[in-house]
Amino acid sequence: MYGRLFLTTLLALTMTTATAQRRQLQEARVILKGDKDYDKAETLMTNLLLDSANIHNQRIYDMWLLAVEKQYGQLNERMYKKETVDTTRLFDLARRMFCIGERLDSLDMVPDKKGRVTLTYRKDNAQRLLQYLPNLLYGGTYHLRKGDLQRAYDFFEQYLDCDRQPLFTGYDLKNKDARMGETAHWATYCGYRMNNPELTLRHAELAKRYEPKLENTLQYTAEAWLAQKDETHYVETLQEGFRNFPQSPYFFPRLMDSFSTKGQYEEALALAEEALKTDSLNTLFMLGKSTMLLNLGRYEDCLDYTQRLIAFDGLATEAFYNAGTALLNIVLKLDSRKQKKQITKLYRQALPYMETYRKLAPQEQHKWGEALYRIYFNLNMGKEFDEIDQLLKR
């Protein structure tokens, strides 16, 4: 008796729930045939989905998608008429359509009891949603301009994720959608601005397709590899950047620093020579060659080249240090007993270079201090020697 009563009660509750569901679906249909209260129709559907019994009901998702699309269309029409519109809400509705459509598609793919998959919604929904795809890019750039980097990134990510969604099978968005590269660039930029190397790198390869911002993309990528302490990929990215943008002030000096830190002076010199082929009068490139000649111990070559550099650019600060240091190192090769006159001559040559360097870079005492101490001592410049001696003792 009690068992029958329980089953009867359960059946009654099930029927009541089903009746309520049909009533809410019917109410939503009526609303959607009109021209207002589309947000109410959406609420009816989201309330139905609060019941776990409805979570796999495709009709509810289909109705929900239509309700959101109607709201978007209504706002878009008002914007077209140049009426005041909540732009944030407009873009949020566009993004929500994709979230709902992709969820509906995942339900559409569930096999029936016989293992068969019948895609009822995919074709129409894919065509339908692709019309709104650019709005994910526009929504991302909108939030980017407002400074909301995370929200902007989420929009760009939603756009890029469409390529892997089964809903858009056959469209090959990654290779056929011209906006993919641009969207990937902005996603990479957001990751960089948020100091998140993982997000910066996630779509960096695709972002390289967007040529107007390729230089920036490569810079963000290099910084991300550096933050992850991945020296190999860091250098590879710098090399790619230099190949594409040899005149950029970013790639060349960092490549030179990377080679120099590892003692790879021949590689650094080769890089400087390659750079000079693109611009033989670029002071930065010339200084790079001068410094590597010095590091390689080719002091006569360094002096000769650096003198030409100084004649071309008298404000190339480090060039004066290189010239003075080259002369001091040449001195070390000579016999102090047999070549005194030549040694004195070299110290006199080094003097103006190192004093000029001191004037141009007073903060670099650790570089010019010992050099001038040595020069003043060997040239018997008592007053100057005493001054530098006291300075070094502080």
Image: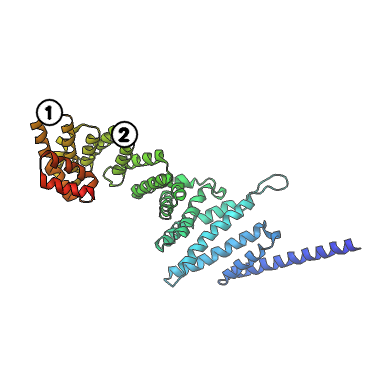
- Please give the name of the residue rendered at 59% of the width and 67% of the height, measured from the top-left corner: 32
- What's the colour scheme? rainbow
Which label was assigned to residue 168? none
Quadrant in the rendering for residue 287: top left
> Is residue 349 depicted above or below 62 in this figure?
above
The spot of residue 1 in percent (x, y) is 92, 63
* Residue at figure coordinates x 57%, y 69% from the top left: 39
Q: Is residue 90 left or right of residue 289?
A: right
Report the amino acid beneath label 1: Arg
Instruction: In the rendered view, tell whether residue 358 sits above or below residue 270.
Output: below
Instruction: Indicate which label's residue lies in the foreground, 2 or 1.
Output: 1
Q: Position of residue 101 (x, y in %)?
A: 57, 56
Which residue is under mark 1? 337
Give residue 185's position: percent from left, percent from top. Answer: 40, 50
User: Which disc number belongs to residue 264?
Assistant: 2
Q: Name the amino acid, label 2.
A: Gln
